[in-house]
Amino acid sequence: MQFAQPGFFWLFLLIPVMVAWYIWRQRRLYGDMGVSTVKGFALPAKTFLPMFRHTDIVLRSLGLAALIVAMARPQSSMSWQNSTTEGIDIIIASDISGSMLAEDFKPNRLEAGKAIAIDFIKNRPDDRIGLVIFSGESFTQCPLTIDHDVLINLYSDIKNGMIDDGTAIGMGLATAVNRLKESTSKSKVVILLTDGSNNMGSIPPLTAAEIAKQFGVRVYTVGIGTKGMAPYPFTTPNGIVYQNVPVDIDEGTLTKIAETTGGKYFRATNNAALKNIYDKIDKLEKAKIDVTEYRKKNELFLPFALIALALLALEFVLRNTLFKGATT
């Protein structure tokens, strides 16, 4: 509860003044008289009324207090945030090429990326999020949706081999932008994660970045992979054999994509670093959105006004009827 006119609370100072005046008046009206004997006086019939002779000042004080509260205009306030038109539309574009099976991340790059991205999705319940996957080509695994349970299930199902191998970064980004171009959201974001360099597809990565810029899409690029060499599992007739393969991330292109669109490039060399990158993106995007807050106020003065009226009316009636002749 809050009060629209709290200045009226100063009127509470009138109550002790009124009580003090009442006490002074009572002392003036009722004095003391000394007599040698009371035999010549008839004793008045005992009654309970004198015990309640001060009821009028109590009712008057309570009535005035309720009236002052009513004049201060008590209000209830309900507020909420409407994120429907102010939220962020996010497409996660994830590389699922064969190199994402390298195990410099645990259990491997692809599975680590999925688990950390799913945590990111769970922490943004008010945003529409979609998923694009790419390898030698790209396609939309899940369009923009607020139903994150469906998105998480679809994300959990992605695996290497769903599409031809290769790394079509430009195609993956272009597909993501195509999903966002009709969006009316104040903020449109692509998180593009890859561990290689573009070697497939008909759209160069920097061309896709220019397209993203034209549609107001901000791209955060993430290079995933340790420095130097990484263990990669090869299937042989004798089982799985691990060999160290070079990590080849085109950081120059990924940086240019981010700079062109107003985003940022990050390098993740392990699980903890990748999680930290998603946390940073989470904070960056929350800081860019101005959520509109709506307030609704309800006036609550009427109950206090009715209480004041009832108390003052009761005091007036009792003072002029039941307690009119009450004495000590």
Image (cartoon, rainbow, N blue to C red):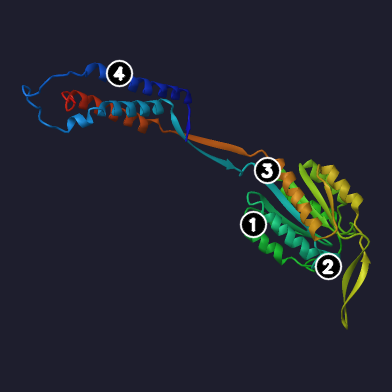
Residue 181 left/right relative to 100 = left
Seen from this angle, which residue lies furthest bottom? Answer: 238
Q: Quadrant of residue 135?
A: bottom right
* Residue with the mark numbered 1: 148
Q: Amino acid at mark 2?
A: Leu
Q: Which residue is mark 4?
A: 24
Sequence order check, earlier mark of 4 and 1: 4
Left or right of 6? Residue 320 is left
Rendering coords of residue 223 (x, y %) = 85, 55
Among the two numbered marks 2 and 1 on one chain, the one whose residue lies closer to the N terminus: 2
Residue 101: give its label: 2
Under circle 1, the secondary element is helix
- Mark toward the viewer: 3 or 2: 2
Is any atom of residue 141 visible in this view? no
- Distance Cα–Cα, label 3 vs label 4: 71 Å
Q: Quadrant of residue 317?
A: top left
Task: Identify residue type, mark 4.
Answer: Trp
Instruction: Identify the residue at image location x=30%, y=21%.
Output: 23
| Furthest residue toward top | 28
